[in-house]
Image (cartoon, coloured by chain):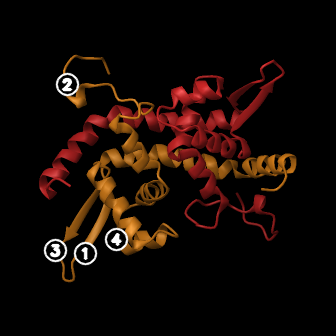
Chain colours: A orange, B red
Amino acid sequence: MEETVTADPADLPFDVFSKACPSRGTLEHVTGRWGSLTLGALHEGSFRFNELRRRVDGVSEKMLSQTLHALERDGLVHREAQPTNPPRVDYTLTPLGYEVAERLLGLIHLMEDRMPTVLEARERYDAVRGAR
Amino acid sequence: MEETVTADPADLPFDVFSKACPSRGTLEHVTGRWGSLTLGALHEGSFRFNELRRRVDGVSEKMLSQTLHALERDGLVHREAQPTNPPRVDYTLTPLGYEVAERLLGLIHLMEDRMPTVLEARERYDAVRGAR
């Protein structure tokens, strides 16, 4: 993005390395412990709240609810209340959320794939420094 | 990875969606607030501790030190003490760290690029729900 002299934040270049840039907060919603797993799960399709809670092993109801609100506010997750009785709420990715989830899953799958190397590195590190 | 009957953790399939899987901890080191920015910075080249502190705007000395130790232990960052007087310590990415940083930067650049869309989504959300 080019630099401008206007004050509209949407016209400024965004830089996560700058602590005042709003992109840093969005990156944290996306990569945070529960944000990343929620986006990764929704890449598989539409989920209801309790289905997501089961898929994202270990998340509390409160944390999942906060995570979904932040992702919905950032335009990454779409929340749709179905006009049924009892009411049913479905969560899906927006097109932007899908694009973000694709990149995130690339990273997640790389990490899962390289875990043997990571565990070997930890053993070497702990052997040199003593168990911590 | 194929499933086996041995108990060696390096032979098991890794799954970040399972809360007991060690890959979840490594993903958090990589995507955490300071881990992601540290890996992103080191993708630009070798840094000394204080250079990194300036590049990763807002990080404290303590948090940067903890972040670098976790990334070094996971085999993503290489720490090299130069035999100079005064001693000088350089941080670089390992080949695995570089691979991880590439994926991470893909995600970071996408987020920075899409921030106008994110900010528009936030405005719409807040207009409907009232300022929070």
User: Tag 3's secondary structure?
Assistant: loop
Q: Which residue corresponds to mark 3?
A: A83
Q: Of label 1 and label 3, which has the lower sequence position?
A: 3
Above or below for A94 versus B57: below
Distance from Cα at disc 2 to Cα at disc 4: 40 Å
Q: Of label 3 and label 2, which has the lower sequence position?
A: 2
Q: Which residue corresponds to mark 1?
A: A88
Residue B11 position by quadrant? bottom right
The residue nearer to you, when weighing B18 against A6, is: A6
Residue B9 position by quadrant? bottom right
Q: Of label 2 and label 4, which has the lower sequence position?
A: 2
Q: Which residue corresponds to mark 2?
A: A7
Amino acid type, label 2: Ala
Residue, far bottom: A86
Distance from Cα at disc 1 to Cα at disc 4: 8 Å
User: In the visual, does B85 lie left or right of A9?
Assistant: right
